[in-house]
Image (tube, grey):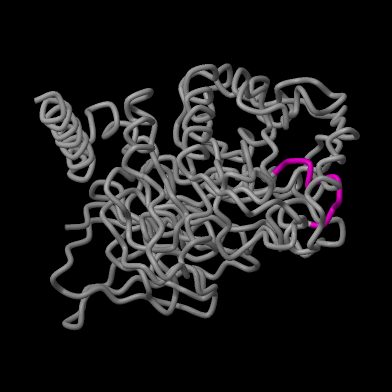
Amino acid sequence: MKSHFFSAILTAILSLNAIAVNAQAVYIPTKENLQSRQEFADMKFGIFLHWGIYSMFGQGEWYLHNANLDHKEYAKAARGFYPSHFDAKAWVDAIKASGAKYITITSRHHDGFSMWHTQQSDYNIVDATPYGKDVLKLLSDECHKQDIRLHFYYSHLDWTREDYPLGRTGHGTHRDNSHPDYQHYLKFMNAQLTELLTNYGPIGAIWFDGFWDHDEDATPFDWHLDEQYSLIHRLQPSCLVANNHHVTVHPGEDIQIFERDIPGQNTAGLSGQSISQLPLETCQTMNGMWGYKIVDQNYKSTDELIRLLVGTAGKGANLLLNIGPQPSGELPATALTRLQELGQWLSLYGESIYGTTAGDIQDAPWGTSTRKGTSLYLHILDSTTTSITFPPSLKLHSATCLNTHAKLPLKKTKQGTIITLPTIEKCPDTIIKIIGVR
């Protein structure tokens, strides 16, 4: 009788767990979450920050893996990590002036080092470095003060912890691989996520990375995403979940990420997944690397960055543009210049970017378009284009060039309405605002 009783109890518990998992599988976002999604989609531009002890080596954020370093020797770098020039206000001032509306920063990357005062491990910026300050707390306080939304990047994989079951990366770090324990590691991650969503005020999103580490497993690896996503939505219902997994979105996710590509393109080989109805985000580097690399001065020009922002907005997506802060805590001088110049452009033409959706024309030879209500913004990226013809079925009320503020004549023909474009030298984006499109 006793064994049957406990068997019945166990069956009931498993049934409840199944119901909970199934409830997340048919995830229904809350009102707060839907509002947060819309606010996120309207922002259109954010800044990504890859910063950690890897910055000290000046070799990018994958240096531990790429150089096959002993993880214990690598960890000694924390003893010298003293970003004396870190100034949260200066960072947020520069990013806000760029026209960006949110910041995504690496809270913990694949090297396992936590950039906040976590209680789950002493391998963090407060306990393991002479700097001894919680930079995420300093940054979150300043973001809230200046009304810049803060997102936390969080790595699903770890090249240093012995409980993480190694995937296809991190095999050269000399860590003990004899006793992986994913349940223990999952408990650790969820405890860290609870800290980030409890002690740092309202957080706009948790941005996961690392799922792809087990994409070659013979048996599909179970990351227990349902449990983790449920935890996030329970702690902060308006916090969005994003996962840079390079595959179709999972239940419980609120943002779809495209790495190094505009949605619909796949030039980097990481974005072949179909486009969902979720808010979209393209993450891209300002130069070549994500983390600080001392020899990487291959910065995209301001004109290139403007075209990237415009092309991304033309697909209805946000651009998350990355900067790798220096080990001193400073943003590189060239990055600061690009931020300033992007801010100048957005101060003039931001109405064609912020709060827009994908336009009626997305992949034209001359460029793309964005839409806001009955206003259509044509972004002419090909300077050789002299005119555009709209089909007769499309009714246009008026057209204005935002660059010159000049009204443009609409010539109606049997073939449609023709707009003759002005000639503007050295212009990365000629913008035509058409009112009354229906």
- Left/right placement of residue 13 relative to residue 301 reads left
In the rendered image, residue 273, in percent from the top left (x then y), is placed at 36, 68
The residue lying at 61 percent from left, 17 percent from top is: 141
Q: How many marks?
A: 0
- Quarter location, residue 172: bottom right
- Left/right placement of residue 110 relative to residue 312 reads right
Q: Quick one: 285 or 79, which is closer to the camera?
A: 79
- Quarter location, residue 23: top left
Q: Quadrant of the C terminus?
A: bottom left
Q: Quick one: 332 or 5, which is closer to the camera?
A: 5
> Farthest residue toward the bottom?
415
The residue lying at 49 percent from left, 43 percent from top is: 207
The residue stretch that appears in magenta:
51-59
Looking at the image, is 370 positioned above or below residue 215? above
> Farthest residue toward the right?
80
Looking at the image, is 206 positioned above or below residue 421? above
The residue lying at 76 percent from left, 43 percent from top is: 325
